Image: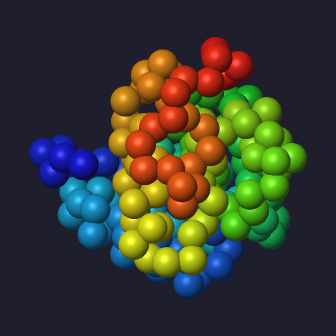
Amino acid sequence: MSNQDSFSVYLADDDEDDRMLFADAVRRISQSITVDTSNNGEQLLAKVFAADPLPDVVFLDLNMPRKNGLECLNALRADQKTQQLPVVVISTSSATEIVSKARLHGADYYIQKPDDFFMLKQLIETGLRLSRTGDKAERTFFLNHAVSQPAPPDASRE
């Protein structure tokens, strides 16, 4: 990632350790990236809808209290202000039905949370890079420990 310009990331995750690891990984990717964290979906949505300008990307856990990740996705995609906001789901699950639901509800990417910090950093960096391109032709959807480069385009996403 380039350090030339600032980049704003919002994260919603109810696990405090995961929020701290995520923020640490992002800081190691680039000092120019600011991270704003929320511990539930309601808090995240309040911050996003009040933001001016919007964050550059939202990372969203699925299993959270108050509003879960899918409810947040629905709210973000239903509002004209946030319809095009890149959203990366980050979850421990790799179950096909969960990944499919995230895509159906409007997630741009899905990251399976890895067990080690280096892999977390690498996956976040990939998610940030992909969300910055905005080029759907270069996008992959599911990112996990096996992904090091973007996969071929998924025609079903167009």
Q: Is residue 46 visible?
A: no
Q: Quadrant of the C terminus?
A: top right
Q: Nearer the viewer, residue 63 or 109?
A: 109
Q: Tell me if 2 is positioned left or right of 118 in this view.
A: left
Q: Residue at x 37, y 30 (%)?
A: 133
The answer to whether 139 appears left or right of 12 in the picture is: left
Residue toward you, 10 or 91: 91
Residue furthest to the right: 97
- In the rendered image, residue 12, in percent from the top left (x then y), is placed at 61, 62
For residue 140, which quarter of the picture? Answer: top right
Q: Nearer the viewer, residue 125 or 76?
A: 125
Number of callouts: 0
Q: Residue 146 location, x and y as percent?
A: 54, 55
The colour style of the image is rainbow
- Residue in the image at 81% along x and 48% along y: 96
In the image, residue 26 above or below residue 19:
above
Residue found at the far bottom of this picture: 17
Q: Where is residue 41 drawn, in percent x and y?
A: 71, 59
Q: Residue at x 71, y 19 (%)?
A: 156
User: Up-down: is 137 above or below 91?
Assistant: above
Residue at far front of view = 146
Q: Residue at x 39, y 60 (%)?
A: 122
Q: Position of residue 8 (x, y in %)?
A: 37, 50
Task: Let me know if residue 128 appears in the view.
Answer: yes
